[in-house]
Image (spheres, grey):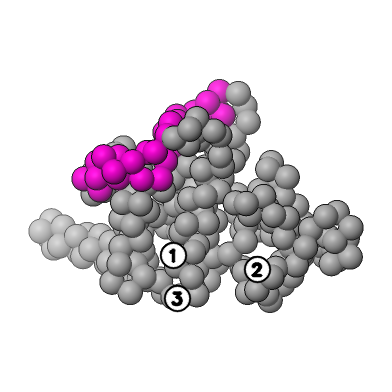
Amino acid sequence: MRALLTILALGLVGSALAAEPITGRASVTDGDTVVIRDVRIRLHGIDAPESAQSCNDAAGKSYRCGQRAAFALADWIGEAPITCEPRDTDRYGRTVAVCRKGGEDLNAWMVREGHAIAYRRYSSDYVLLETEARAAKRGIWAGAFDEPAEWRRGKRAAGLENPPSTKAETQAPAMRGCAIKGNINRRGDHIYHVPGSRFYDRTVIDEASGERMFCSEAEAQAAGWREPRN
């Protein structure tokens, strides 16, 4: 009887681990988090700078490395569907997964291009790629930066960090009727995106950086934002 129970238990564990892949078009929340059909997915084994985090480039000039990481991931995915293979669930309820565009490991790509580091606390899968990116001085390795986990600890110590928001929280302004997203791109251009437009779904608003929601195009234009040029 004990052997039978053990076999049944192992079968249940195996079925839980063999979760079905999640496939579809992704919205990028930040450099290591995407959303597919309302499922928030944390990229396994990597840690990207936080949305509000800044780094220094090779010349010592500060730039928004967290935003740059998110843009890089969004640009690389483009309009293509991706497939995410679940590995675990984190403490915030997000699915932890390896995500692929075609056959390419997106987690690996982020580390190899210097947009994220290997998250050694949870995995050593991408350590060699991090070593390669550091040697080539790609992305954040071209200058100086705080590891994302250290940056988050500093925010917690200062009482400034909140846990990752839920989809309902990030969409609250839209639910109140103000659905136009005012984004500031990497060049500093102020651009607004209306629902249904090309980049609307993958545009994430960072209010701490001056981005905001608008209730009408006229309001956005009056505040100095413009519509996309393409």
Which residue is tagged 1?
76
- First reached walking from the N terminus: tag 3 or tag 2: 3
Within-10-Å neighbours for mark 1: few <14, some 14–19, many 20+: some
- First reached walking from the N terminus: tag 2 or tag 1: 1
Give the image quarter of residue 141.
top left
Q: Which residues are magenta?
A: 128-157
The span from disc 1 to disc 3 (Cα, nearest Å) is 9 Å
Identify the element where label 1 is drawn: helix
Identify the element where label 3 is drawn: loop
Which residue is tagged 2?
200
* Disc 1 and disc 3 in contact, CB within 8 angstroms: no
The span from disc 3 to disc 2 (Cα, nearest Å) is 15 Å
Percent x, y for residue 38? 55, 67
Identify which residue is drawn at 45% across, 67% down: 77
Percent x, y for residue 12? 26, 63
Question: Which amino acid, by three-letter code, is at mark 1?
Answer: Trp
Query: Magenta span has 133?
Result: yes
Magenta residues, dominant SS class:
helix
**Is residue 206 placed above or below 81 in the rendered structure?**
above
Within-10-Å neighbours for mark 3: few <14, some 14–19, many 20+: few
- Asked if residue 123 shows in the view, the reply is no
Which residue is tagged 3?
80
Query: Magenta span has 65?
Result: no
**Is residue 206 placed above or below 82 in the rendered structure?**
above
Identify which residue is drawn at 63% across, 31% down: 160
